[in-house]
Image (cartoon, rainbow, N blue to C red):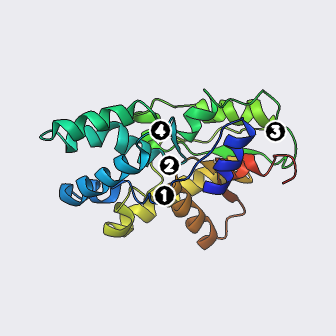
């Protein structure tokens, strides 16, 4: 997913740098209530990304951590909180960036796979970032693919961070409902923009022997670039 994202950004004319010292942004710790380790990881992220221009991630979850959690984490540390605010203004999730500063012309990737596509809307992309149908529109405009309606596209796939580990029966039930909707859509390709959802959906589809390829949208688009 990361390599596909880099290829797409470079195709749009971006100069891409991947700092070798970066690691997890701290989201798993933050979501688990472990603010101490969340702050430690956030500080390291802020240090590594200091001095960069735009910061782009193919994981909306990570972007949201930097958007919404960092400033709260450093409520009692004004210097670090200001650094968090400065980073927040430079952070983009890949979907937003490819529909904004790195937008490719319509039809640029109208080659390759012609199978019907369904798109799962990562909950936080819809509910927090307000993305809604933006990914559907991006796929249609760049590729001309037949994006078919997916019932309850904005509903959780069952991953829910640690929910898939802590409440396995609940997670499996939600996943089954999602995959039933995918099967009913007739799509042969299922796209999502969040790596956690990707792992959950891909694993579930494989276990249930559902005939659908589950991909991060960056993988789907990058496969259509010239020379791929």
Q: Mark 4 points at which residue?
A: 125
Q: Mark 2 points at which residue?
A: 59
Label 1 sits on a secondary structure element that is helix
* Image quadrant containing the C terminus: bottom right
Q: Mark 1 points at which residue?
A: 196
**Is the C-beta separation of discs 1 and 4 under 8 Å?**
no
* Image quadrant containing the N terminus: bottom right
Q: Along the line of sight, which residue is nearer the eye, 25 or 199?
A: 25
Q: Where is residue 62 in the image (x, y as percent from the top left)?
A: 42, 48
Q: Mark 3 points at which residue?
A: 109
Foreground: disc 2 or disc 1: 2
Q: In this view, does 194 lie to the left or right of 111?
A: left
**Is the C-beta separation of discs 2 and 1 under 8 Å?**
yes
The residues bearing labels 2 and 3 have C-alpha atoms spaced at a distance of 22 Å
Question: Crowding near pointer 2: few (<14 within 10 Å), some, many (20+)?
Answer: many
Q: Which residue does the image show at 51% across and 54% down from the upper left?
A: 19
């Amino acid at each position: 997913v990361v390599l596909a994202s880099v290829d797409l950004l470079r195709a749009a004319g971006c100069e891409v740098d991947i700092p070798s010292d970066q690691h997890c942004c701290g989201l798993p710790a933050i979501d688990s209530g472990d603010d101490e380790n969340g702050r430690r990881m956030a500080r390291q992220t802020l240090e590594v990304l200091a001095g960069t221009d735009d910061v782009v991630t193919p994981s909306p979850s990570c972007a949201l951590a930097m958007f919404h959690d960092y400033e709260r984490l450093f409520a009692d540390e004004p210097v670090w909180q200001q650094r968090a605010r400065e980073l927040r203004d430079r952070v983009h999730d890949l979907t937003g960036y490819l529909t904004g500063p790195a937008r490719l012309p319509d039809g640029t990737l109208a080659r390759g796979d012609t199978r019907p596509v369904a798109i799962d809307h990562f909950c936080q992309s819809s509910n927090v970032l307000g993305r809604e149908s933006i990914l559907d529109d991006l796929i249609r405009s760049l590729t001309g693919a037949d994006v078919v309606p997916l019932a309850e596209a904005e509903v959780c796939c069952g991953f829910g961070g640690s929910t898939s580990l802590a409440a396995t029966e609940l997670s499996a039930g939600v996943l089954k409902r999602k995959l039933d909707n995918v099967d009913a859509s007739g799509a042969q390709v299922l796209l999502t923009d969040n790596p956690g959802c990707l792992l959950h959906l891909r694993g579930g589809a494989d276990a249930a022997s559902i005939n659908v390829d589950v991909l991060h949208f960056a993988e789907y688009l990058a496969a259509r670039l010239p020379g791929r």
